[in-house]
Structures are given as structure tokens and as C-alpha cells.
Amino acid sequence: MQFRDLVKQYNALQSQINQAIHDVVAGGQYIMGQQVAELERLLSAYVGTKHCITCANGTDALTLALKAWGIGKGDAVFVPDFTFFSSAEVVALEGATPVFVDVDTATFNIDPQSLEDCIRRVKEEGAMVPRVIVAVDLFGLPANYGALRDVADRYGLLILEDGAQGFGGSIDDRRACSFGDISTTSFFPAKPLGCYGDGGAVFTDNDEWAAAIASLRLHGKGVDKYDNVRIGLNSRLDTLQAAVLQVKLQSFDRELEQVNTAAHEYSRQLSSHVVTPMTPNGYRSSWAQYTIQLSDMSCRNALQRALRNAGIPSMVYYPKPMHAQTAFRSLSQSADYSRYAATRLCDTVLSLPMHPYIELSEIDQVCRAVIDNLV
């Protein structure tokens, strides 16, 4: 059993993917070929934004957004304490300070009340200027953008949607990667829409920011590649990855249906035994992960060992909150992290095998093993 079976997906799409790769190799346009521009058009239409700018990876996508906004020293950027490292790493790389915000235990996403408390604290201390909220769509579920937008408007902050895991999720009829002032995603192979290497994209309706990001991803290019008007990055999505993503996008909605069916079956079997993921009314997850919560760390670790012995892969996303990362221990922040839900989640979460091609028999096998090995 695979945690996320990319081979099954390839087998289902093999002829189309092979043809798309062949066309790129035969055409000889390996960097910024026509497939890149076409993918950007398709992604923009799918998400519902005016602009899509692809780039080399999801981390660069976040970096490009912060650079377009001029975020730097003296700026406070509010980041969930329970997320992957890059959500905060990019802030520090720009010279700004990540301020870690607690999360909602039911959705794993940033807690609007904790966010407002953190903003008020930063304003009262006066050492930094609040600038940006990084809202992560963790495990495939969009964050609470209605509440987050209220907070952002009240304090004059920008929202950067980190949709690295969220592509394909939605709230009512609006899709993930359209909720931020700028939104980003990752096409890392294990993501809901993944390529066969690294890749990322930035989405926005703002013409000025889109132009800046398009320049920044190409060394700060101006009217031509030898007219550099700003300090930028080398962050292009290569043509082969764009071709693969075009094929996968064609089957993406079908795969979303399949993965939501799988999640429903997991919850049906497990909800009376463990804490299962919650999807609020009107929300749809793209299920980058299916994550349960156990009673404590010893129970979680014992279950993971039992699953491993049964040949069932599982993962802990994430074992350490952002505030406890070695790279951030020098930050002087006054929050009482011991009271954060994020701290407890790191001790109790466990992610189970999840992908669009998982079979019902495999879900049954996982659920039986979970139920039989709870302590």
C-alpha cells in the first residue's frame, strides 16, 4: 500500500502523459514553451482569477508574492503555528518577522480570534508594522476566509493564501487560490494537482502585482531579458512540467470526486473511534491529507508503529510547531505557546493513506488496523 499512489495515477493517464511529454521533447521548447502559457490560462480559468503566473515551486510562489508587496525588515507577517516550514521561512528570508498564530483544532487552519489577538499585541508593542496574513489551506481545506477578510480589513492587512495543499478545495462556489489578495499553490508531486518534479503558481486579480511577479520570476526582467529593472529570481516552470499538469488538470475534477468519496468512507468507519477531520458546511476539501487526532502522543506513536508493522504507511504532519523550530527560537515573541492548540496537535495527529485511486478494500484494511490498535 502506498501513502499517496502516484503510480496508479500515472497508469490511469499513461497514454495522455506520454504523448504530452513526447510533444515537448519533439518540439524542443524546454523552458517557457507554449505549454506554460496555455497552462497559466487554464489554471486562471479554473480558479477564477484574472492572472496566473507559474514558477519553479510553491516556496518561490510565496516569495514572489511577498517581494511584489515589498515586505521586509520591520514588517510583521502572521503565520499559522501549525503548518509546513516554508509558510514562515519565506517571511524570514525577506527580512520580515513571522508572528505565529494558533489554529482551530477542528479544521487545522488559522484561528481568526487568535489572529486578532496577535495583531493587537504587535500593534501595542509597537516594534513592528502588521502587514500580511498568511492563510494556509491545510490538508486541502480552505481557511475561514470570511472571518479572515473581516480581520484583514479591520486592521488594513493583506491576505496571502498559501494554497500549496488546497488547490481544488472550495467554499460554496468559489475555489481555493482565489481568496487571497495574492494566492499561491504548489505542484509538488504529492500535492492534489502535482507534476513530476517541482512547480508552483501565483494567482491574483491585481494587474500591477501580476506584472511585478512575472518580472520577478525572470531575474527582474523588464522589456527584454537583458533589461533588468528589479532584483528577482530564476523561478520558471519548465515546459515538461506544464505539459504533465495540463493532462492532470483534465482529470482533476473526477479525481476530486474520488478522493472525497474516500474521505467520506474513512470518516464513516472511524468517526466513533478517533477524532476525524471536519469539513464545515459549504466547504469542500481536496484532501491533500486525511488526518485523524489521537488522545495523546503515546497513543499516536503506538498506533503508527502498529500500522507500520501491518504494512500500512502513515505520516505525522507536523511533529513540531513553527514556534519550536530551531531556526525561529531566537525570535522574541510574548505568546504563551503552551496554551496553543497547535502544540497539542503536533503530539496527536496522524495522516492515513489518501489519494484518488485508493481502493475501498485498502480503506477497510486501514480502518480495521486503526480500530484494532487503539490504546
Image (cartoon, grey):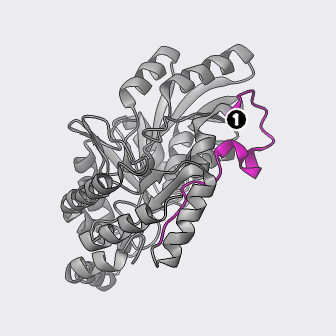
Secondary structure state at the residue bearing disc 1:
helix
Instruction: Please indicate whether residue 300 sits to the left or right of residue 326 in the image.
Output: left
Q: Position of residue 213 (x, y in %)?
A: 47, 46
| Image quadrant containing the C terminus | bottom right
Res 71 quadrant in image:
top right
Instruction: Please indicate whether residue 282 sits to the left or right of residue 365 in the image.
Output: left
Res 8 quadrant in image:
bottom left
Q: Position of residue 72 (x, y in %)?
A: 66, 36
Instruction: Please indicate whether residue 257 sits to the left or right of residue 21 in the image.
Output: left
Residue matched to label 1: 338
Instruction: Determine the main secondary structure of the stretch shown in magenta.
Output: loop
Tell me what residue is drawn at x 44 percent, y 26 percent: 148
Q: Position of residue 51 (x, y in %)?
A: 32, 44
Magenta run includes residue 336? yes
Q: Which residues are magenta?
A: 313-338
Tell me what residue is drawn at x 62 percent, y 24 percent: 118
Magenta run includes residue 365? no
- In depth, the one of 248 and 227 nearer the eye is 248
Q: Position of residue 191 (x, y in %)?
A: 40, 61
- In depth, the one of 23 and 95 nearer the eye is 95
- In depth, the one of 7 and 129 nearer the eye is 7
Tell me what residue is drawn at x 45 percent, y 74 percent: 312
Res 190 quadrant in image:
bottom left
Q: Is residue 13 visible?
A: yes
